[in-house]
Amino acid sequence: MSLSPTERRNPATTEIDRLPTLDVLRLINTEDHKVAPAVLAVLPAVAEAVDLAVAALRAGHRMHYFGAGTSGRLAVLDAAELQPTYGAGAGLVAAHIAGGPPALLTAAEGAEDDEALGAAAAVAVRPGDVAVGASASGTTPYVAGALSAARTAGAATVLISANPSAPLAGLADVHIAVDTGPEAITGSTRMKAGTAQKLVLNALSTAVMVRLGRTYSNLMTDMVASNTKLRARQVRLLTQATGLDEQACTAALAAADGEPKVALVALLGQASPAAARRALARTSGIVHAALTALRDA
């Protein structure tokens, strides 16, 4: 079997253990610079995955992440941040990691070899959902079991790997293969491959939220204000979007029962919170469309 690119030795770093500290860091940084261009090369595949996920979520379905080790931890992190950032309801994007929650803090690398465990994790997948498997090598049995079970359940499937020849590609409708090449330390996929997976997951989920109308321009209209910083950010969002002062925006947010998107549409559309809420409901929560609906009413 040919080696995954991440398992090959990197000729540029064979002397890394004999170099001064700064030179070690320069070598690692040189390798890191290769990640963003590698992600750029696969953006068409990322766009396909985004469109699959948007269609599924608009139809009332869910997106699931499956991964093991570093890939699984990055997937859990990405999913966890969507609720406070974009108001994504609990479970809208669900992450499953081999070994369960304890694997977030303590390595449970043996769990990734269990294909049946991946299939069991996918029991929550329903027809119409999207299942995203993250595996740097593109060989992880846990991910294989999850994607196979998800496909059988009638879900669309996506694989994110660092291996253009990933054996699991046949289980995916879309294969996002970021060729980051050999790692600075052979096989240490928490490095370039992990960075690439974080970039892809961030881009995928962010683009999905943008397409679902959870932003206005580049402002987060659906974030949950669960602390002082985020409450201040809600008011700042309104001042940035409307040009009004903080006092007016604070009052509008209160009148909208703390819902920044409702307050925003009310302010920009010169409408009551109730009218703004109705317009948003008619336009799937998309601010530009809601403003058009208010003007045409």
Image: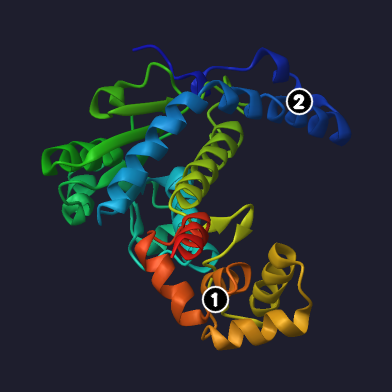
Q: CA distance from mark 1 to mark 2?
A: 54 Å
Using a 10 Å C-alpha cutoff, classify the residue at mark 1 as few (fewer than 14 neighbours), some (14 to 19) or many (20 or more): some
Rendered location of residue 138, percent (x, y) = 37, 28
Residue at 21 percent of width and 50 percent of height = 122
1 or 2: tag closer to the N-terminus: 2
Rendered location of residue 24, percent (x, y) = 80, 31
Query: Which label sits on residue 30?
Result: 2
Residue at 76 percent of width and 25 percent of height = 30
In this view, 60 is above or below 201:
below
Rendered location of residue 21, percent (x, y) = 85, 36
Q: Which color scheme does this rendered protein use? A: rainbow
Rendered location of residue 35, percent (x, y) = 63, 28
Q: Amino acid at mark 2?
A: Thr
Residue 105 appears anywhere in the view: no
Quarter that holds the C terminus: bottom left
Residue at 76 percent of width and 31 percent of height = 29
Looking at the image, residue 243 sits to the left or right of residue 137; the answer is right
Marks 1/2 in contact by CB < 8 Å: the verdict is no
Count of numbered badges drawn on the protein: 2
Q: Given this view, does label 1 or label 2 mark the residue nearer the observer?
A: 1
